[in-house]
Structures are given as C-alpha cells and as structure tokens.
Image (cartoon, rainbow, N blue to C red):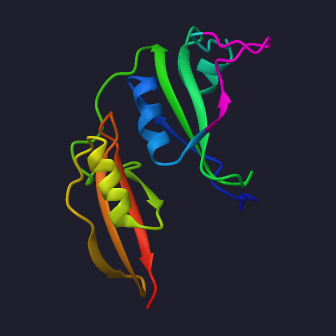
Amino acid sequence: MLDTTQVFHINVNCTDLDRSLEFYRLLGFREVIDFNATGDGASSDVLGDPVLGPALGLPANSSARARMLMLGTNPRSARLDLIQWIEPKAEGTAYPHLAHVGIARICFRVKDVQDAWQQLTDAGAEPFTEPVLIDMGGSRQKFFCAYDPDGVVVEFMEFLKD
C-alpha cells in the first residue's frame, strides 16, 4: 500500500483563467502560487516548461496559464489548481450531468449554506435548487449545487448540529 497522506490539490481546467479566478475568489480562495511568475517578480502570460507537457501526457510544446489556490492559512489544506490550456487548447465541455464516470463534482463545506446560496445568486450564479435538507451518513446537512463558469458542478454543504 502506498503511504498516501492527504489530497494535495484538485485540478480544474478552465477556458478563461481570469473568469474562473473571480468565481473561486468569491468562494474564499486565495492565490498561493502564480505559476506564470518569472524570477524577477513579474508575471509572464504563459507557463511553458518543456517537461510539463510530457509529464502530464501532453505534447512537449504545451503551455498554459495557471494559479494554485487555497482556503484558509493551514499550509496542509488541499489546494485548487486552475489551468487554462493555451497549447493544446482546452476542448470539450463539462459533463452534461453528474451520472458520468470520473470526477463529477467538488464539494465545499460552508458555515452558512443559505448565505453562500444568496451570495452566489447575487453574483449571477444559477444554483440548481435552493438549499435542501438531507439526512445522510448519520448526520444532517443542507446543501445545494451550482456550475462554475465552465460548467463544473460545485456543491456547498453545511453540516447541522443535532
């Protein structure tokens, strides 16, 4: 058995990095790494390391714009890796519904699901429903889902005390 200790990051490919950054900042994420930063503190437009593509199963001339995001200040928190592929250009669309093989959605725990729903709705998101109450796994939760700017399903869950 591998000695796996944590989920380090989840990668979300996006079609417009700036638009996706705006959405995930609304959720409370902050940038912790600008992969396009140069050694002199400036930022280049594109990340194009020749080993990146082949290591990810892509062509050697691959290039992207990318940022690593994090919630809170715990250095061991899982991170969100947003990438806008320039070469090869990202293609396709998110799953049309959640009954597909593969990573289907990302769930974020929130303190106040109604407040999260309101803030996202005010920002123009269109949640599937208002928050709903469920009993699952011996606990009660309220949750709702919405799409991110590229159609990735994002879930927001509040765990309720008895």
Check the image and report above or below for 138 versus 79: below
Check the image and report above or below for 96 versus 13: below
Q: Which residue is at the far bottom?
A: 162
Between 50 and 138, the residue placed more toward the observer is 138
Quadrant holding the N terminus: bottom right
Q: Main secondary structure of the magenta part?
A: loop
Magenta stretch holds residue 43? yes
Range of residues picked out in magenta: 31-44
Q: Position of residue 106 (x, y in %)?
A: 43, 52
Q: Residue at x 65, y 49 (%)?
A: 8
Q: Residue at x 30, y 26 (%)?
A: 92
Q: Residue at x 22, y 47 (%)?
A: 126
Q: Residue at x 57, y 8 (%)?
A: 61
Magenta stretch holds residue 32? yes
Left or right, 6 with respect to 13, comes to right
Q: Position of residue 76 (x, y in %)?
A: 72, 54
Q: Which residue is at the far right?
A: 40
Between 85 and 60, the residue placed more toward the observer is 85
In which quadrant of the rendered view does residue 117 lie? bottom left
Q: Position of residue 50 (x, y in %)?
A: 67, 11
Left or right, 157 with respect to 39, comes to left
Quadrant holding the C terminus: bottom left
Tell me how many marks there are.
0
Q: Position of residue 78 (x, y in %)?
A: 62, 51
In which quadrant of the rendered view does residue 52 lie? top right
